[in-house]
């Protein structure tokens, strides 16, 4: 049986495989992916839920995506006690963004840079976390 730690490592490894892929709104492949895709594709690969690419809005921001995340994760009381594999939500009014914490960096589909990147969790990125979610394990 796969351990919680192995699941988290596999989640991060799957997300890392997209680093360098171009940013594409509603993208779900290595030819183009957005921040939601960078979360749901690895979750799908790990068998957490079945993803249907034809129904993007179902896994858009808001209740749909958060409900999927909450099936397997709990919301942290403080986003400053992060562990690898945590899913980070950034919210600025109408704009929202997701990233994955690797233990010493974050992976996200950065639309300003135009690709999936991995970089340190600097002061800007840590102070702007709106919510953080952690895998419950089994």
Image: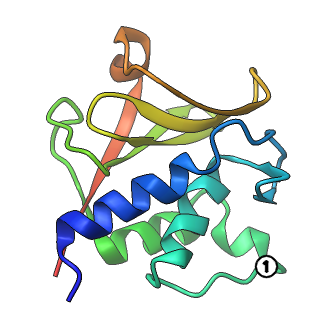
Q: Quadrant of the C terminus?
A: bottom left
- Helix or strand or loop: what does disc 1 sit on? loop
Q: Dividing the picture into quarters, in which one does residue 19 lie?
A: top right
x, y percent for residue 78: 17, 37
Q: Dividing the picture into quarters, in which one does residue 122 lie?
A: top left
x, y percent for residue 43: 49, 71
Q: Is residue 123 above or below residue 13?
A: above
Q: Is residue 53 left or right of residue 59?
A: right
Question: Residue sitting at 55 percent across and 77 percent down?
Answer: 44
**Could one spot residue 136 in this view of the protein?**
no
Residue holding disc 1 = 55
- Given residues 97 and 23, the one toward you in this image is 23
Q: Is residue 98 above or below residue 69?
A: above
Question: Residue sitting at 31 percent across and 51 percent down?
Answer: 85
Question: Residue sitting at 37 percent across and 28 percent down?
Answer: 105
Q: Residue furthest top?
A: 123
x, y percent for residue 21: 75, 42
Q: Is residue 118 left or right of residue 104?
A: right
**Could one spot residue 70 in this view of the protein?**
yes
Q: Is residue 90 left or right of residue 81?
A: right
Question: Residue sitting at 59 percent across and 51 percent down?
Answer: 17
- Given residues 136 and 118, the one toward you in this image is 118
């Amino acid at each position: 049986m796969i351990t919680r730690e192995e699941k988290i490592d596999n989640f991060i490894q799957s997300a890392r495989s997209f680093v360098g892929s171009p940013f594409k709104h509603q993208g779900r492949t290595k030819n183009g992916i957005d921040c939601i895709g960078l979360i749901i594709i690895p979750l799908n690969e790990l068998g957490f839920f079945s993803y249907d690419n034809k129904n993007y809005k179902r896994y858009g921001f808001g209740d749909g995506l958060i409900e999927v995340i909450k099936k397997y994760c709990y919301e942290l009381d403080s986003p400053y006690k992060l562990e690898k594999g945590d899913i980070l939500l950034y919210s600025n009014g109408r704009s929202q963004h997701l990233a994955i914490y690797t233990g010493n960096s974050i992976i996200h589909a950065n639309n300003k840079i135009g690709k999936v990147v991995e970089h340190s969790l600097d002061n800007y990125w840590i102070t702007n976390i709106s919510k953080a979610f952690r895998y419950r394990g089994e």
